[in-house]
Image: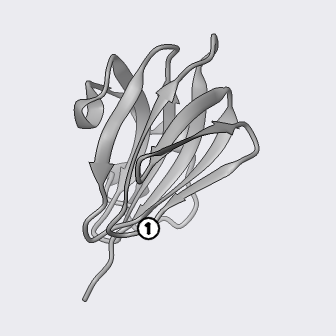
Amino acid sequence: MDNSQNKEKFNFNLDDIEETVIPNFKGGEGRIRAHMAVDENNRIMHGILEPGCSIGIHTHEGSSEIVFATKGEVVVTYDGIEEKLSAGMVHYCPDGHTHGMKNIGTENFEMLAVVPQHRS
C-alpha cells in the first residue's frame, strides 16, 4: 500500500500503521479511529467507532465498500433502511448506493473495511 513501510508488500499488519483519528467522518457524530493502508486501487482499514459515534450517510461514487464487523454492534442505514450489524456479520455497499452507521452499543465497534476503487 502507499505507506512507506508497506510499499511493495502484500502482507502487513494494519495495527502497525499509525492510527488516524477523524472527527465527524462523512458528517457523522464523534470520531472514528483507524489504521489505514491506501493506494490508487484500495483503502483497507481497521476502524474503531466508539459508543455514540457515527459515520455520516454518504454515497459511494466510483467505489464500493465491504465492512466486516469484528466487535460490537452498530445500526447501518443503507439506502434509507436501518439494520443492525454485529460481530461476525458483513455489510456491503455497492457503487452508487448510500450508507452510514452509528454505534448504538456500550462497547467499541470494530471493523475491517475494504474500499475498492472502480474504473470505467
Front residue of 119/96: it is 96
Label 1's element? loop
Does residue 64 appear anywhere in the picture? yes
On screen, residue 55 versus residue 67, left or right, reads left
At horizontal 62% and vertical 17% (from top left) the residue drawn is: 105
Residue 40 sits in which quadrant? bottom left
User: How is colour applied across the structure in the image?
Assistant: one colour
**As displayed, is residue 7 above or below residue 83?**
below
**As displayed, is residue 2 above or below residue 68?**
below
Q: Percent position (x, y) of residue 104? A: 56, 19
Quadrant for the C terminus in the image: bottom left
Q: Percent position (x, y) of residue 103? A: 53, 23
Does residue 19 appear anywhere in the picture? no
Q: Which residue is mark 1?
A: 94
Amino acid tagged 1 = Pro
Q: Percent position (x, y) of residue 84? A: 63, 36
